[in-house]
């Protein structure tokens, strides 16, 4: 499954898009766990101390923020889905 990263997360990964090997019928949570296995430095940017996705981090599945999907992080994802991960961004 291809996953695209933006802003500071792209710096951790070293490129815009990576391929992540996940099992069939995997959930968003499984995908996040697999990404963190490959890039453990990203954990502090994605998850709070309780292992929950920060509210200011956006994992988009086909353009929809994962926490707002019907099954949130337990939503099953498919190989053809478009996955994008955005860290908190600020401006002023």
Image (cartoon, grey):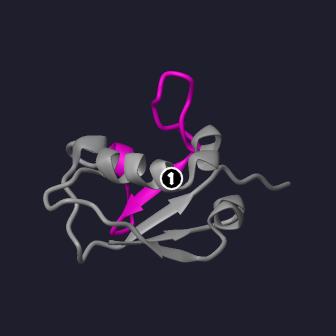
On the picture, is 82 further left or further right than 35? Answer: left
How many numbered marks, from 0 up?
1
On the picture, is 90 further left or further right than 29? Answer: right
| Residue at 56% from the left image edge and 43% from the top image edge | 46
Magenta segment includes 49: yes
On the picture, is 1 further left or further right than 35? Answer: left
Instruction: Identify the residue at the far front of this view.
Output: 38
Q: Point out residue 79 in the picture as x, y percentages from the top left corner.
A: 23, 73
Q: Point out residue 2 in the picture as x, y percentages from the top left corner.
A: 39, 74
Q: Point out residue 83 in the picture as x, y percentages from the top left corner.
A: 39, 67
Q: Does 21 appear above or below 35?
A: below
| Residue at 32% from the left image edge and 72% from the top image edge | 1
Q: Does 40 appear above or below 44?
A: below
Q: Quadrant of residue 61?
A: bottom left
Q: Secondary structure at mark 1?
A: strand
Q: Quadrant of residue 65?
A: bottom left
> Which residue does the numbered mark 1 point to in the structure image?
58
Instruction: Identify the residue at the far top of this view.
Output: 50
Q: Residues within 10 Å of mark 1 (few under 14, many from 20)?
A: some
Range of the magenta residues?
46-68
Magenta segment includes 65: yes
| Residue at 66% from the left image edge and 71% from the top image edge | 14
Quarter of the figure with the C terminus: bottom right
Q: Nearer the viewer, residue 50 or 36?
A: 36
Q: Point out residue 39 in the picture as x, y percentages from the top left corner.
A: 56, 54
Instruction: Identify the residue at the far left of this view.
Output: 25
| Residue at 66% from the left image edge and 49% from the top image edge | 88
Q: Does 48 appear above or below 87?
A: above
Q: Nearer the viewer, residue 64 or 75?
A: 75
Instruction: Identify the residue at the far right of this view.
Output: 92
């Amino acid at each position: 499954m291809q996953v695209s990263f933006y802003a500071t997360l792209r710096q951790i990964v070293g490129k815009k898009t990576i391929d992540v090997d996940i099992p069939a019928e995997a959930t968003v949570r499984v995908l996040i766990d697999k990404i963190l296995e490959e890039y453990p430095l990203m954990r502090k940017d994605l998850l709070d101390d309780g292992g929950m996705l920060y509210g200011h981090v956006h994992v988009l599945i086909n353009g929809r923020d994962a926490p707002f999907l019907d099954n949130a992080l337990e939503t099953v994802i498919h190989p053809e889905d478009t996955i994008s991960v955005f860290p908190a961004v600020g401006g002023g």
